[in-house]
Each structure stands twice: as C-alpha cells, then as structure tokens.
Amino acid sequence: MTEQEIVGLGPAFAAHLRRFRGSFVQDRTAKHFDTYCRGLLSDLPRKSIEPIAIEAGTAVRTLQEFLVTARWDQAAARDTLQKHLGAVVADLPSDPLGTVGVIDETRCRKWGDHTPGVQRQYLGCVGKVDNGIATVHIAVTKGTFRALLNADLFLPKSWAADRGRCEKAGIPEDVKHQTKWRLAVDQWLRARGNGLSFDWLTFDEGYGAAVPFLRFLNLVNQRFVAEVPVNFSVREAASGPALRADARLTEALARNGKRHRVAHRTVRGSFWRAATATAWVADREHTLVAAVNESTAEVKYFLTNATAAPLARVLAVGFRRWTVEHAFRLGKQEAGLMDYEGRNYTGLLRHLTLALIVLGFVATHTERRRGPPKVTAEPVCRALNQRCAVVFRRRRGVPDARHASKVIGYHQKRNSQAAKSHKKQRHRRSI
C-alpha cells in the first residue's frame, strides 16, 4: 500500500464508524465507541478494556461502563453491519458459486471460572481440554470477499441450570441453553431479515449431524452442503433400512471416482477423488458425497439437498469453509475478537459485536483494493494499526515518555492492590 492509501484509511474508517451512530443514545457514548473500535485495530498485544483505555488516555472505569452499563443497542449495531455488508455483497462481481454462507464455531481459552459460558472443553487453539468459551458464527463469502456477520455465545447446560451463577454474570433470565444448531438457525433468520440471502450454506459435521437443522433448511428451500460423520444415518430409499454413510457409499468407491482439484488461497490446490450416491434423510432425497484426498488419504463425507448440482460445484461449496477459518484467525490476531476479559454477559456480547464491526471495515476495504498489486486483509490491518496509534497519540495530548510513565505507575498501583488482596485471603485461610 502506498503512503497516500495508508493516510486515506483514517477518514474511511471514521466514515465507517459513523454508520453506527444511530445505535447510541448519547454523543459521549458514541465517542467511547470510536475509542474502543480504534483500540481493537491498534497494535496492542492484548485488546481488552484496560489496555485500550490506557493507550487512548481514557479512564479504565469509563470504558468498562461503556461496554457493560451504558445505554446503547448492540443488536441495532449488528443489524446495521449486516445491512451494510449485504449491500457490499450485492455490488460485488458475479461469482460461479454465488453467495455462500458459512456456519462455524470457535473456542478460546479463559483462565478463570467467571467468564460467561466458560467450561472445560476441548480447545483447538491449545490442542487439549481446558477452560474456555465457545461462540457460534455465520459468515458470508463471495469470490474473494469474506466477512463475519454474527457472533453468539454458546451457554452450556451447566450454566443455564445454575441461575445464581447466571445472575452474577449478568445473563438475563430469558437466556437459556440452546444447541449450537438452533443458534445457527437464529443467525440465518436474522441475516435474511437484514437483506442477506445465500445461494449456498455450508457447515461442518457438528451441524451436519443435526437432522432437525437439515430439515429446517429444506423447509425454507435453502441449498446446503453439509459435512457429515462417517456414521451418519441415511437410507437408500424412502422406506429402506437405515445405513451408515460409509456403508451406503464406501471409501473404495470414492477412490475410484472422478478426480477433482480444490483450489486454496494461500497454498497449492489439493486433489480429491469423489463419488456420489442417492441418500434419503429427513424424509427427503439428498446426494451423499464421499471424497478422498490423494495426498493425505483423508476421507470426507458431504450431504447436499441440491441433487441436480454438478459434483465439482458441490465440492467447491463444501470446501469454502476455509474462509471462515481465515476470518477467525484474522479476528483473533488483528481485532481482539476473543480478548474480552470480564465477567459480564452484556460486555462480552458487545465486545464481539464491536470486533465484527471493525472486521467488516477491513473486509470491505480489502475488497476495494483487490487488483494489482494485490492487497490482503493483513496489510490493511497493519496500516490501520499505525493510523489508530496516531489518533491515540493526538488525543492523549502528552509526550510519549509522560504517557509511558503514567502507564507504569498505573500497573504498579494495580500490582500493589492485588498483592494486598492476596495477602488478606491467605491470612483468612490460615485463621
């Protein structure tokens, strides 16, 4: 990116944030919104309330109140984002696959026991069972464009059953445990209500194994390509006996099937052998696909209700799930998507919403910069790091050395308070 383009990011980002002014009751709340969003796109190693407030020269308590208790409508902000991204997608050049929606979830490690929804579970980010939270997302992709549209916290049964714990975390009484596929249904309905429509929907076997979810998508005439487990139950005919997917369509048949190349964005394409068979699921005819990777021997099973679609297109849609993985990685590394450090449900949801807003700007601006020379989302984020740092230095109005001294003093005070607190607790236990 040229120097002129980097400088131009500042006004463009400010214009993007102004779209959401209608979600705020007071002007000062909108100013904190601006500060928080710029903090999420800054070069801070940890993008939670405290580091953002210190970097921006704002009182930490003030930014905590903005995220937790201030009067503003995060649902309206999310709807504004979806309508904006829907307009962006509609203006994009046509693509052979059309607009593809992707449903997936991500997990993040949390060390304490008070973050809403935290429980011991397998976390892919650390490769083991540990304390963490899970969030469900729907994303949109068309051509080279991809963006996250929504984020919902998955509330485990253990939390929903302990209303005292929920009350302490600020979880409303009407928020109950819902399966992840039901959260996905709500997100799909919300996106449709905000003007987004998907030519295809794709998701992994965690959602593909939920037959009621597939039944819902069939009822609303939403074409999908679902990855399903090998032991997924299908029928050869409407009234036939139930069979496992790998019994209805064996791996050997897939190995002898037609060869397909699957393109990837950052690595060379992979080659898969695939075969198809008719399968009845949820009282409807579907196409079952078995695919084997020629290099790794990995086997995947897909199910689609688009029975007339060519196999090459079904595979292309099924493998579009990589786009949401990239969006998660970008969100966590560049926009603090999972950096929330707090014990309040509203604060967590608002943090997720604000991260989606800044990622929406990165996605749209990256798409505008496609073409020679190619620009990806990561360089756009690096440039925004610098622009946000310039804005924060100007707002602080003090020399960097003086600001650094204040930051060090703040942390020394916090460490001293923590030491006293721990000392009192140890003393009480010894008594």
Image (tube, helix red, strand yellow):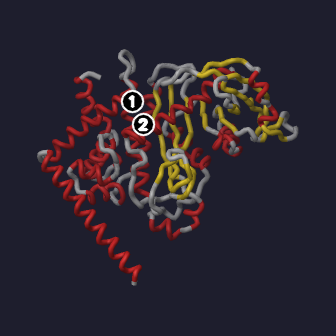
Quadrant of the image occupied by residue 120: bottom right
Asked if 32 appears above or below 171 in the picture, the reply is above
**Disc 2 element:** helix
Quadrant of the image occupied by residue 87: top left
Please name whichever residue, 64 or 259, is drawn nearer the observer in this view of the structure.
Answer: 259
> Residue at the spot x=74%, y=23% of the render?
255
**Disc 1 element:** helix
Q: Position of residue 395 (x, y in %)?
A: 17, 45
What's the mark number on residue 330? Answer: 2
What's the mark number on residue 58? Answer: none
Please name whichever residue, 227 or 29, is drawn nearer the observer in this view of the structure.
Answer: 227
Q: Where is residue 279 in the image (x, y as percent from the top left)?
A: 79, 33
Q: Which amino acid does label 1 sit on?
A: Ala
Rate crowding at label 1 as few (under 14), some (14 to 19) or many (20 or more) other CA atoms within 10 Å. some
- Count of all numbered marks drawn on residues in the image: 2
Q: Mark 2 or mark 1, which is nearer the start of the sequence? A: 2
Q: Position of residue 260 (x, y in %)?
A: 65, 19
Q: Quadrant of the N terminus?
A: top left
**Seen from this angle, which residue lies furthest bottom?**
431
Pointer 1 with pointer 2, Cβ within 8 A: yes
Rate crowding at label 2 as few (under 14), some (14 to 19) or many (20 or more) other CA atoms within 10 Å. some
CA distance separating discs 1 and 2: 8 Å
Q: Quadrant of the C terminus?
A: bottom left
Q: Can residue 80 be seen in this view?
A: no
> Residue at the spot x=58%, y=63% of the render?
158
> Residue at the spot x=60%, y=60% of the render?
157
Q: What residue type is labelled 2?
A: Leu
- Report the side of 167 relative to 365 (left or right): right
Q: Mark 1 points at which residue?
A: 377
> Residue at the spot x=26%, y=57% of the render?
60
